[in-house]
Amino acid sequence: MTHAAMQASLHDIVLPADAAGGAVAGMLATLALAGLLALVAGGLLRLFSLRRAKVPPAPSLYERVTALSALSEAERRTGLLHLLKNERPERFARLRDALYRKDTPLDTDKLTAELLGHD
């Protein structure tokens, strides 16, 4: 079979005009394939054209402690306790008994030292 004969036989693969649906069925099939191709092309373009948002690095523990220094004494103590509970739970457990004592309030310098690991 020659190349020209093969191409001619491929062009003959269409529904006959007197088939059920005829030309309308052929147009609908073409429209469906074109829509599917458009969806695939759009999805690929979206996938490759999206810019990845750069997430800024989380502030270090030292930076978070330093940011608390601008707050009032009570707010700073509360912030330091939250950080201590999340970052150094073993040290927070040692201080837990002293949290609710009125006679010995927690010193923010002591909390900062506990949080940053200075003994």
Image: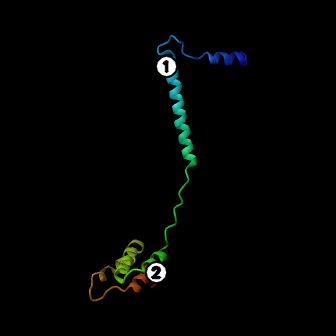
**Badge 1 amino acid:** Ala
Above or below, 37 against 109 in this view is above
Q: In which quadrant will I find the N terminus?
A: top right
Cβ atoms under marks 1 and 2 closer than 8 Å: no
Whole-number angstrom distance, CA of label 1 to CA of label 2: 76 Å
Name the spot of residue 80 as percent of width and height, x first. Answer: 39, 78
Q: Secondary structure at mark 1?
A: helix
Residue 93 quadrant? bottom left
Check the image and report above or below for 101 versus 57.
below
Residue 101 in percent (x, y) is at 27, 84
Q: Observer-nearest residue: 91 or 44? A: 44
Badge 1: residue crowd in 10 Å (few <14, some 14–19, many ≥20)? some
Q: Residue furthest right?
A: 2
Nearer the observer, 64 or 117: 64
Return the mark for residue 117: 2
Quarter of the rendering containing residue 91: bottom left
Disc on res. 110 = none
The residue drawn where x is 30% and y is 81% is 99
Residue at (49, 68) in percent of width and height: 58
Which numbered marker is on residue 25?
Answer: 1
The first of marks 1 and 2 along the sequence is 1
Q: Amino acid at mark 2?
A: Gly
Determine the residue located farthest toward the bottom in the rendered image: 103
